[in-house]
Image (spheres, helix red, strand yellow):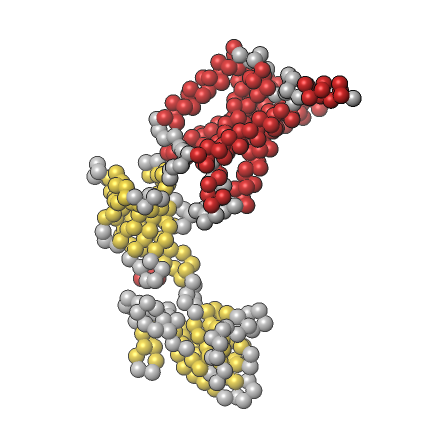
Amino acid sequence: MGENNSTIQRNLWEYPWGYVESFFIGFGLIITGFFLEVSITSNSNFVLVYPFNIAFLVSYVLVLFILSKWFSTSLIISWLTKIPASISSIVLVTLLVMVMGIIPQTPSENNIITNLGLNKITSNWAFLLIIFQFLTCLGLISIKRILQFRWSNFGFILNHLGLFLALIAGILGTGDLQRLSINTYEGKPSWIAINEQKNEIELPFAFYLKDFLIEEYNPKLALVDNKTGSIFHNKGRNLYLVEEGETYVFKNFEVTINKFLSNSGRIGNRYAPVNELGSPPSASITVKNIETDSITRGWISSGSFRYPYESLKISEDYSLVMTIPEVKKFSSDIDILTKEGERISAVLEVNKPFKFKGWKIYQLSYDDKMGKWSNLSVLELVKDPWLPLIYVGIFMMIAGAMYMFWMGNKITKNQ
C-alpha cells in the first residue's frame, strides 16, 4: 500500500504533465500575480504604449517562433502545446473574468478588493500572467501547425491565430487607447479636451459648434395627490401624452386638452405662443368631475429653468400637472477646423459617430439644466489604433469556423 502511494506521489510531476500539474502552475501564476499587486504600490496601471507595445509584439512572436522551431522537445514548450495547459489557462482566465463580472470595476472602499486589484481585473498582474500563459499556448500551437502546414489544418490555424491576434491586440492596445471629452459652445472654437485623468489635452484640430438642436416629445399629463405629492396610479396608466383634442379619464375626472403650445409665456390669465429663451410648453385644459358634473378650466405648464411650473388644482385632494418633456433626439452641427486651413462639416448624433483622422467623434451630452436652449454640446473622442487588428482576428476566427464547417461537410459527403 505504501509503495503504491509513493509511486503516485513520485509520478505527480512526471512527464508528460497532465491537468493536475497544469492547474497547479496556473494557480501559482495567479497567486504570484496577487503578490505583485500587493507588493508593487503604484497609482498607475502597468500598460505598454507605442512604440514599446509594437516592439514587444514583434519580439514576443519572434521568441515564440524560435521556441517552436528549435526547442519544441523541451519539457516546458512541449507542455505548453498540449491540451491540459490550454484548458487550465482557459478555465482560470474565465474564472477571473467571472470575478470581473461580480465585483464592480470601479474604485472601492474595501481594502482587500483594492489591494488585490479585484476592481481592475484587466490590468491585474494575476490576469496578465494567466492570459500571457494562454496566449503563449495559442501562439506556440499556431506556429507549430503553420510549420507543419496541411490544408486540413487551415481552419484550425485561422481559428487559433485569429484568437491570438484579437486577444493580444486588445491587451497591447490598451495603452494607445485615447478617450477624451470636449465642451463646445455655439459660436466659439474649442480645441482643449479632457482625458479620463482630468488632464487637459490640446487637439491638433478645433471644433466650431454652429448649432445644437434638441427634438422633444410632447410633455405628459399626471394627476398628483395634493397631500403626498405622489402621482396617482390610474390602473397602470399614470401618464398621458399631452395632445390637443385628446380626452383622458383620471379616477372620476374627465380631462380634455383644449390647446397645446410647445413654446409659450403667460400673458395675464392665459398663455400665448412665445419664441424666446426658456419659454416652456403649456396647455389649456377642461376638467369635468363625472360624479358632480362640476367643470374646472385652466392652464398648466411644465416650466423651465427660467419660468416656474404651473399646476391646476381640481379638488381638495388632487391637482393636474405637466411633466418636463423628454428628449427624443439631440445633435450638433459642427465644423472641424484643421491647422492646414481645412473646414469639414459634420452633424453628430448619439450612436452615430463621425470618423476623422483615426478619431471617432461622438455626441455625448449637453447642459441638461438648460434643456433645448443649451448652447453647450459635450463631444467624446475615441482613438483606438489597434482596433483594426482586433477585427482582423475576429474575421479570421469566423473564416476558420466556416472553413472547418465546409471541410466537415465535404468529408461527410465523401464517406
Q: Is residue 3 left or right of residue 154?
A: right
Q: Is residue 286 above or below residue 13?
A: below
In front of the other: 187 or 274: 187
Placement of the N terminus among the 4 image quadrants: top right
Expressed as whole percent of the image width and height from the top left, the position of residue 140 reads 54, 19
Please tell me which residue lies in front, 193 or 335: 193
Q: Is residue 393 above or below residue 334?
A: above
Q: Is residue 128 rendered to the left or right of residue 272?
A: right
State the residue at coordinates (34%, 62%): 369
Residue 164 coordinates in the image, percent (x, y): 51, 27
Q: Quadrant of residue 359?
A: top left
Task: Pinpoint residue 340: horizontal percent, then vertical percent.
Answer: 21, 36
Q: Residue furthest top?
A: 70
Query: Residue 101, image x and y in percent?
Result: 54, 44
Q: Which residue, as the protein is rendered here, is positioned at the far front? A: 2
69 to 5, vertically: above or below: above
Please state, as top left, top right, bottom left or bottom right, where the C terminus lies in the image. top right
Number of marks in picture:
0
Between residue 298 and residue 91, name the one nearer to us: 91
- What residue appears at the point 45 percent right and 21 percent down from the top-left corner? 60
Q: Is residue 98 left or right of 335 when viewed as pictured?
A: right
Whether residue 284 is visible, yes or no, is no
Residue at 61 percent across and 25 percent down: it is 22
Taking the spot 30% from the left edge, 79% from the top edge, the residue there is 267
Q: Is residue 133 visible to us here?
A: yes
